[in-house]
Structure formats: C-alpha cells, structure tokens
Image: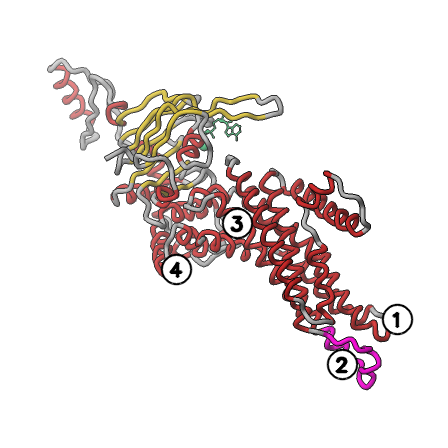
Amino acid sequence: MNGILLIAQNTFREAIRQKLILLVGLIALLLVFASKYLLKLDLGHEQLRFVFDFGSGALDFFGAIIAIVATCQLFHSELENKTVITLLSKPVGRLGFVFGKFVGTAAVLALFSLIIAAATCLMLFITYLGFGEAAERLSAGLETNYAGVFAYAFMQWLKLCAIAALAAFICSLSRSLLFSVIISFMALSASMMVAASDWLGAKANLGTQIAVIAFPDFQVFRVAEVFAFAPVSAQVMLVGTAYSAIYMATFCLLGAWVFSRREF
Amino acid sequence: MPPVIEIKNLKKHYRYGIRGMAVQAVDGISMSVDEGEVFGMLGPNGAGKSTTIKIILGLLRQSSGECLIFGEKLSRDSRRLMGYLPESPYFYKFLSGFELVKFYARLCGMGEKEAKTATMKALNLVGLGDAANRQVGLYSKGMVQRAGIAQAVVHNPRLVILDEPASGLDPIGAADMVDIIARLKREGKTVLLCSHMMSEVEKLCTRAAILNRGKIAAMGMLDEMLAQKDATDMEFETDDAEKLAQIRDFAASRGVSTLKTERAKISLDEFFRKTVEKSK
Ligand SMILES: Nc1ncnc2c1ncn2[C@@H]1O[C@H](COP(=O)(O)OP(=O)(O)O)[C@@H](O)[C@H]1O
Ligand SMILES: [Mg+2]
C-alpha cells in the first residue's frame, strides 16, 4: 500500500513536470475561458447552456486525450528508460507497480477535472453577471447549480479513470508507446460506438455483449450532465462510482496479472 | 548459516523472433556466495552475467534450476535486504539526486525522517553530497553511476549486487568505486560484483567465477587461482646494477635461477590518478 502511494506520487510528479500534458491541459482551459467570446450569436437564454457545454466538451475531449496519453506515456517511460528494473528490484511487486502508475494518473486527471470545473463555474458566473438587468429574462428560469457542475466533473473524472484503466491494461500487454496509444484510442472510439449503437437501439448479440463488458459504458456518466442546472441525484452518483470502481479494479488487476508475466 | 546466494544448475534461454529461435544465455550454473565476502563474477560480453543477476533478483524467470537468497526463495522480505545497481542504469530525470535516493529508501519501508538521514549518508558515501539538489537529468555518466550505488545501499541491505559498477567511468571514478565497495565490505556486507574489468575484481574479491557462454569456466579463491607454481616475486629497494648482479649470483649459487629482473613500476592507472590529483 505504502509502495503504491509512493509510486503514484512519483508518477504524479513526473506528469506535472512534463510539458505535453501541461500543454493539453492549458489548451482545454483556454477554450473554456474563450467560450463566452466565441459566442457570436445572441442565443439569449441558451447562453448559460452554451457555456456549460463548452466546459463539459473540454472535459470530455481533452480529458480523454490526457487519460490515454498520460497513462501510456507514464507507463512506457518507465519501461523505455529502464527505471522499471531498479523499481522492481525493490520490495514493490508488479501489482504495486501497475496500481501505483494508475493512481498517479488518476490524480493527474483529478487535478485536470477540478481545474476545468472551476473554470466552467467561473465562466457561468461571469456570463450570468453579464446579463445584468435582464437576468430574469435571459436565464429563463435556468439556475446554475455550481455544486452540480463539480458533481458532473467528478462523474467525468470517474469516466476518465475508467479510460485510463483500460489504457493501463493495454500498456501492460504492449511493448511500444505508439502501439499502446493507437490501440487505446481505437478502444476509446469503440466504446463511443458501442454507446451510440446502444442509444440507437441496436439489437444485442454476443459481440455487442462482450463490447459492453469490455468497454466503459459512457452513458452511466453522461446522465450527470443535468446536474449543472438541476439538483444532484445521489443515486446517479452512487451508480457511477460503483460502476467505475469495479471497472477500474478489474482492468488494473488484469493489467497487473499480465505485467507479472513479463520479463525485464 | 546458509549461503547468502545459492544457485543450483541454473539455466535460462531467451526466445526471440516469430519462429521462437532460442539463445541459451545461462547454461547450468551452480555457485554460492557466503556472508561477508565480495564475490566476483567475470566474463566477456554476452557471457550471461546480467542474466544470472536478473534471475537472482526475480526480474527474469529461470528456465530451470534453483536460486535461493538467504536460504529461501526470493520474497518481498528478502528484497528489503538486497540492493541492486543495474547495468548502465537510468533514473528519473525529473528528480534531484536527493529526491531520487529518498524515493527508493521510502520504497524499502523507511519512514520520511529516517529516509532523509539515510539518503544524505548514502550520497556522501558515493561523493554526491554536493550535487544532491541537482536534477539527475543533468548528471554526468559517472554521477549517475554513483547515484546508482547510493540507491543500492541506502536501505542498509545485507547483500549488494552490482552489475558493471565501473563501466563508463574514468580511472579516478573507477578507483573511487573500488574504495566504495571496499567500504561496503568493511561494513560486513556481502557483495556480488559483476564485471569485465579485471583490475577491480582483483583488488576486491576473495573468490571469483569466470563465466563464458553461460557456463562457469573457472571458480575458486583468487589467490589460489592466480598463484604461480615454483615462482616467487621479490622487490628490492635498490636500482644499483652491481648489487643486483651480486644478488643474482648468490641466487644462482643456491641453484635458483632468476626469471626476470626489471625496474619496479607503478601502473599507468595509478600514475594517471596521481598526475591528475597533483594538478588539482
Ligand atoms: N532479452 C533478451 N532477449 C534475447 N536474448 C538476450 C536478451 N538478453 C540477453 N540476451 C542474450 O543472452 C546472452 C547473455 O547476455 P547477458 O546476460 O546480458 O551477458 P553479459 O551481462 O554477461 O554481458 C547474450 O548472448 C545476449 O545476446
Ligand atoms: Mg551484462
């Protein structure tokens, strides 16, 4: 346990000192801040919704990129720089290694989600202030639930962690960074397609059933979108947390098992 | 007491390529290392030294044979008693030397305070005390190697395994390395020293094994293996040709022939070090 936390801390530190991840995070943040100024049309009461969609879009899109790139990069840098050899000669264990790397990435994702959520809230607030006298008319009964925005970000963080767990599993199988990244993005697109086909009401067969188990079910997390302008539902949060926890544990354990069979 | 390392008929083959071509890297090695000794493992490149070490550390699985540490199969507890310097090591470039060594100390179960003290001690031992706060990414090859030793001894292990500790070091660095290992030996640690540099091994080891193509070609006490039958070296404190001729004549009168007489020399290695030190 101690080992997992130490490795996680070290992984987090590596990520923070790494420029690429920082850059992606910064672009996402800028986009959120730009949301108000990108809005040329007078959407009237849709403005608040537009600003929130921008924030959630940044969280969704850039979050997925960071989840995959950070996981693969942090995992493979350890293998390619051969630091893993020294690390595994210490009383750590392969399970400790995989979980440590994962927890470190999850911390990076948590930081990212928190920053985007805070930026979104700030923009929502500024937009609301901008309404001035016409606030009543322009917000059209839409009241921002700032705590709900954070609840939504938390749910998105759970989703990103599930993606990271899948990527960590792929990394434990693969020998090259590029391969891991490509396969992880393919898995991500597959999950999106599964979600889409599910939404379109496609008939279930064995193939889709396996896909439903193997790829994270994004719908579980997406329903939290409404929290931005409505009360938070504890049930939705609980279901999301439980689902994500089971998904993460399964794929990290699988990853650790695969990794324990590797030689260095 | 059981030997610190005991290897019995160890074999390892690597498979590579799609057709599964095999390389026999270790081919039936048996040896044991006792508590408190510095054991040398010599051999040309590709002899199987690193492979053997990695099996001892559990980084590779043997194809067959047995390997015991402190009389038992490798476990998390025995890992705590071992330190390892990998061949041409790399460390986290984004950490400072201090952060790096402290990280490994913590992993070995030390508390924060204890780890800090131990880290400073280890860094001073290897002569990195002044560079402790510099990033490892900025270290020279020799400094990385030193940090590697610090990392291997920071948790005060009983057994230290060093894979080519002096590779890539200049003669001064290599001599420092010999000093450091000699100090570990004085502290009573067991050292498995793997090298293809004969001079280090000769200065440090009591026993050694020579590996070639995955097999042990020779093994035993260094003194015994190197001793020449029917010959003795003597060194006289004179360079007077006349006196030396008399000594030779005296020896001849006793029926002992003199095989060689030459000016005593220091090694180039030693000369180099003294020159550099003088011009400091
Ligand atoms: N991962 C590997 N895959 C295939 N062959 C390997 C691998 N590692 C080492 N070998 C081969 O095993 C032999 C022994 O290597 P090694 O133990 O590194 O030798 P040494 O450390 O004595 O120089 C060499 O022939 C080397 O090519
Ligand atoms: Mg080697």
Report which quarter residue B99 is drawn in: bottom left
Q: Mark 4 against mark 3, which lies toward the viewer?
A: 3
Say which residue label 4 marks: B112
Vertically, is A104 above or below B215? Answer: below
Q: Is the same chain shared between marks 4 and 2?
A: no
Task: Give the alpha-carbon distance from disc 4 to disc 2, as whole Å.
Answer: 49 Å
Vertically, is A181 above or below A104? Answer: above
Q: Mark 1 against mark 4, which lies toward the viewer?
A: 1
Report which quarter residue B73 is drawn in: top left
Q: Nearer the viewer, residue A180 or A135?
A: A135
The reply to whether callout 2 and callout 3 are in contact (CB within 8 Å) is no
Task: Give the alpha-carbon distance from disc 4 to disc 3, as whole Å.
Answer: 22 Å
Residue A48: percent from the left, percent from the top?
A: 78, 72
Q: Of the two numbered discs 1 and 2 on the same chain, state the one appearing first in sequence.
A: 1
**Helix or strand or loop: what does disc 1 sit on?**
loop
Disc ID at residue A99: 3
Mark 4 Cβ inside 8 Å of ligand 2: no
Residue A137: percent from the left, percent from the top?
A: 84, 81
In magenta stretch: residue B4: no
Q: Amino acid at mark 4?
A: Glu
